[in-house]
Every structure is written in structure tokens, then in C-alpha cells.
Amino acid sequence: MTLFEISIRYRAQAEDLWRRLEELRTQLPGLPLERRGAMESRIRMLTDMWREARDLAVLCERYYERGYCRNGKYTL
């Protein structure tokens, strides 16, 4: 599997996470206060997962491009 093929999977995962986030955000206003905190925590966690999947997709897509400035978060 090449890095470009991996990037396609990361991008698909990011899209799935984004759709789920949108679903949860639409449900949030109708929740009772005792469940709202748990839902907000879940949304924050999924947002972090979405951001990482999106960043890794870009990193894998552009890894071999000359002059690409890599995200320091994912380099040693």
C-alpha cells in the first residue's frame, strides 16, 4: 500500500467523522442538561479524531513533494 492509498483511507475516515459530528451537533440543543456535558465531551473527542485524520491525509498525500513543509506534530 502506498502513502497515497493510505491518504485516501484517512480522507474517507475524516469524512465519516465529520458526518457523525454534524449529526451530534444537531442533536445537542434538544438534549437535557444532564446529558449535554457527555455529548459535548464526545464531540470534542471526535473533533480531535477528525482533525488528526484530515492532517494525516494531507501528510501522506504530499509526503514526497519537494518543498512541502510537514506538520511538526507528526515528525520525529
Image: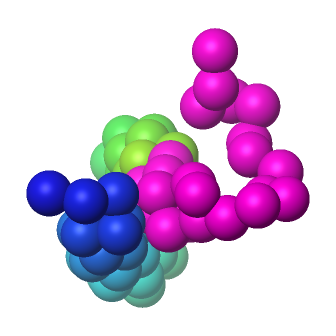
Q: Quadrant of the C terminus?
A: top right
Q: In which quarter of the image is residue 50?
A: bottom left
Q: Residue at x 35, y 69 (%)?
A: 4
Residue 47 in the figure: left or right of residue 21: right
Q: Where is residue 27 in the image (x, y as percent from the top left)?
A: 35, 78
Q: In terms of depth relative to the viewer, which is nearer, 57 or 68?
A: 68
Residue 63 in the figure: left or right of residue 33: right
Q: In terms of depth relative to the viewer, which is nearer, 30 or 13?
A: 13
Q: Which residue is drawn at 76% across and 61% down?
A: 66
Q: In terms of depth relative to the viewer, which is nearer, 18 or 43?
A: 18
Q: Which residue is drawn at 60% across and 65% down?
A: 62
Q: Can residue 60 be seen in this view?
A: yes
Q: Residue at x 24, y 69 (%)?
A: 5
Q: Position of residue 29 (x, y in %)?
A: 49, 76
For residue 53: magenta? yes
Q: How is the image coloured?
A: rainbow
Q: In which quarter of the image is residue 67?
A: bottom right
Q: Where is residue 38 in the image (x, y as percent from the top left)?
A: 37, 41
Task: Examine the rendered structure and indicate whether residue 34 appears above or below residue 7.
Answer: above
Magenta range is 50-76
Q: Is residue 47 visible?
A: no
Q: In terms of depth relative to the viewer, which is nearer, 48 or 64?
A: 64
Residue 6 in the figure: left or right of residue 33: left
Q: In which quarter of the image is the N terminus?
A: bottom left
What count of labels does the image hold? 0
Residue placed furthest toward the top: 76
Q: Position of residue 2 (x, y in %)?
A: 25, 59
